[in-house]
Amino acid sequence: MEYEVVIGLEVHVQLNTESKIFCSCSTRFESPPNTNICPVCCGYPGVLPVLNRKALELAVRVCLALNCRINKRIYFERKNYFYPDLPKNYQISQYKLPLGEGGYLNLPSGKSIRIKRIHLEEDAGKLIHQDTYSLIDFNRTGIPLLEIVTEPDINSPEEAFEYLNWLKLTIQYIDASTCDMEKGYLRCDVNISVREKGENTLGTKVELKNMNSFKGVRDALEYEAYRQIDCLKKSIPITQETRLWDDGKKKTFVMRRKEEAHDYRYFPEPDLVDFVIGEELIAKEREFIGELPLGKRERFIHNYSLTLKEVDILISQPKLADFFESAVNILNEPKHIANWLLGPFLECINSLKEGEEIKITPNNFAKIVKYFLDNKLNNLSAKRVLSLALLTDKDVDKIIQEEGLIQVSGEEELSIFVEGVIKDNPKAVGDFSQGKQEAIMFLVGQVMKKTKGKANPKVVREILERRLLK
Ligand code: ADP
Ligand code: ZN
Ligand code: MG
């Protein structure tokens, strides 16, 4: 028997706003506990929420980027439940009429995942459990969230992983959220069922919670698909339930069964008026959306002869992709620019200390690559110039001059060093004449050392060969 895995994802992202969704409290992550709070987000009696315009704009932007139909009439509903991190005892959310519906996200694999709905809501507070008591931080209460729900179109843990990566990148491209999972700016619940291949009706779904990385989601889904298929094989009924992923044990555990499911008693939020989103707002957000990651990926593949892996790394950070293209505009050597960016440049960036800011311009970067291609800087010196140029906007020519790094390629000048090295290393010279090819690399190395790394190794090798093979 063959089985099919069916997955639907519910992703929450925190929108990139300065203030909360219904009050003017700050959304700063670093603030001490319970300092970004007010009567509105703490649900005092008699207060009135006011919708944050920026949150709505960003939400509309995401809906457009994910090809959703926008419901222009906006209203909110109360989702009632009692929980310590929810001071009002209800969450303001959208239910019957979400902001966006009927969208899709295309993946590089060619598959299109349909987006069922996107709605705006407020976040709850954060519980910090200690040994015998719990602490509550209300700073997060009322932070704007967007919930993005897919149709059950995903058919493997790997595909869920791909969807999450592209969703995240798409949202980052349009500046709607940083999607920083470590800070909880992107959270994901997954629903999974299995069925026999060819079966039309969906199997009983299980909801998984508590994954804190995309890898965790993939692992949890793999475990759960395996567990459910095993149940089907043994004719054990699968119960609709919520399970928690334990990342240490690499297993899922039952958290609650369907019977315990909440009845949220949704009803329209009376404190927020209904209103209609204007065409101007939508037009403005549509204009903001530039090239999206998939489009950029296809264009890069088409325009530059790079490997898929190179393209994927370049487009994974909009800034890096822009830097690449600016540099290519100056020096039309995409392959070399990409090599230097993805190799030495990223290496330099990874070794930066906290607080150090990258200031190098694409122009300066292209110049370094050009010096290298013109044989004016050898590989070592070019890397050195790059590390010196990274944190300044000082001109590369000046740095090279100050450091005296211009490559020595002149035969005459190099011959003097070569003669010296031949004289000082009779053993290597002897080895080479007896056919030991490696010996010449040693001799080249000696010349490099004598010239403090400035010699052109190719020319040195030529001179040595000419001299010793006579
Ligand atoms: P609920 O009302 O229980 O929240 P929804 O219909 O809103 O269920 O679906 C929630 C998520 O679960 C969606 O992403 C949807 O695609 C997914 N889903 C629904 N049914 C199934 C199923 N049988 N198997 C896998 N995923 C499912
Ligand atoms: Zn507040
Ligand atoms: Mg639901």
Image (spheres, rainbow, N blue to C red):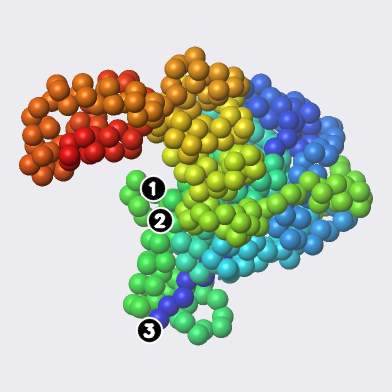
Density class for disc 2 (Cα within 10 Å; few <14, some 14-19, many ≥20) is many
Select label 2 or label 1 by which is in front: 2
Q: Is mark 3 within 8 Å of ligand 1?
A: no
Q: Is mark 1 within 8 Å of ligand 1?
A: no
Q: Amino acid at mark 1?
A: Asp
Q: Amino acid at mark 3?
A: Met
Question: Residue 39, how many percent across, how many down?
Answer: 77, 27
- In the image: residue 268, left or right of residue 206: right
Q: Residue at left 44%, top 35%?
A: 375
Residue 130 in sight: no
Q: Amino acid at mark 2?
A: Asp
Q: Residue at left 69%, top 41%?
A: 175
Question: Which residue in the protein does label 2 denote?
Answer: 219
Q: Is residue 175 above or below residue 155?
A: above
Tell me the number on the disc at residue 357. none
Q: Nearer the viewer, residue 245 or 453?
A: 453
- Measure how far apart labels 2 and 1 are at the Cα level: 8 Å
Question: Which residue in the protein does label 1 denote?
Answer: 247
- In the image: residue 96, left or right of residue 1: right
